[in-house]
Amino acid sequence: MLRIAVPNKGSLSEPAAAMLHEAGYRQRKERRELVLIDAENQVEFFYLRPRDIAVYVGSGRLDIGITGRDLLLDSGARAEEIMELGFAASTLRYATRPGTVTDVSEFGGLTIATSFTGVVAKHLADNGVDASVVSLDGAVETAIQLGVAEVIADVVETGTTLRNAGLEVIGAPILHSEAVVIRRPGDDSQEVKVRQFLRRLQGVLVARRYVMMDYDIRAELVEKAVALTPGLESPTVSPLHDQGWVAVRSMVPVQDAQRVMDELYDLGARAILTTGIHAARL
């Protein structure tokens, strides 16, 4: 049975559970559930603190896990990223009061407060900066006001929280993060089941990024239409009962669907429909 770690709370929890559900796996109904066995799919889910997942996977106690890239790198655990999941995107950045320092090269002798001490310490070392790093668990933006540090390093999405605290983002991003699947390097004991799990998640990603588009068009315009809807490999083209017309079916990126429909209509296509994709294997 494949043993998988899943975030039990925070910004990773609900999107991870939704993706697993779309991939055909059972998920817990109550937050109090810490372990769930999906016997039909031969999977056992363990709901853990996102920050601890890399440690459990890296120790070999669990086969794979879903966590953030930032948490994986900060843990120092013997685990590696094997798949990006396309949600919970964030950036780890430095911030301080306006008019003080403006770049990591000026941090020498200062104190930086963060929840990601491992990542920040490595970044400072990589840049040849001798600075102190203080570990705080949440509400890092108050560290400067309370005199704990001169600079903070925190996860930034819109920057609103930092601006409200009177701080500004400085320097280049330390790290770009998102939800990822992780695994212990060299562990191939569950290789077949892991590959199946990854295929299912990849199918969800494809289903979310594409729609199926169907339309009718005159045969002499097929080549121009297919140039607009090339699909992943090649579209399906079928003759219609009315001579001179064909039906075309192709996968189209969600973000392009409305534009493509307009262009197909202008070309002469009719009965243009889009359908959501619930699952895929490529």
Image: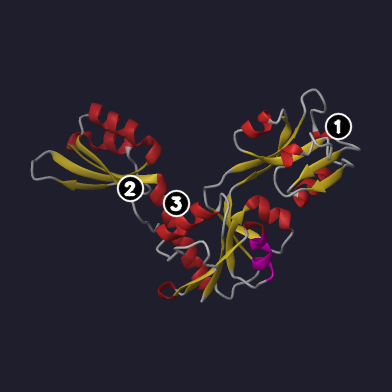
Q: Nearer the viewer, mark 3 or mark 1?
A: 1
**Comes first in the chain, label 3 or label 1:** 1
Disc 3/disc 2 C-alpha distance (Å): 20 Å
Q: Which residue is mark 2?
A: 234
Q: Position of residue 46 (x, y in %)?
A: 56, 68
**Among all residues in the image, which is located at the extreme top?**
99
- How would you rate the neighbour count of disc 1 (Cα within 10 Å): few for under 14, some for 14-19, many for 20 or more? few
- SS state under label 3: helix
Q: Which residue is mark 3?
A: 205
Q: Position of residue 131 (x, y in %)?
A: 88, 42
Q: Quadrant of the C terminus?
A: bottom left
Q: Position of residue 106 (x, y in %)?
A: 86, 32
Q: Is residue 185 visible?
A: no
- How would you rate the neighbour count of disc 2 (Cα within 10 Å): few for under 14, some for 14-19, many for 20 or more? few
Kindly report the secondary structure that dominates the magenta region of the rendered protein: helix
At 40% across and 37% down in the image, what residue appears?
Answer: 255
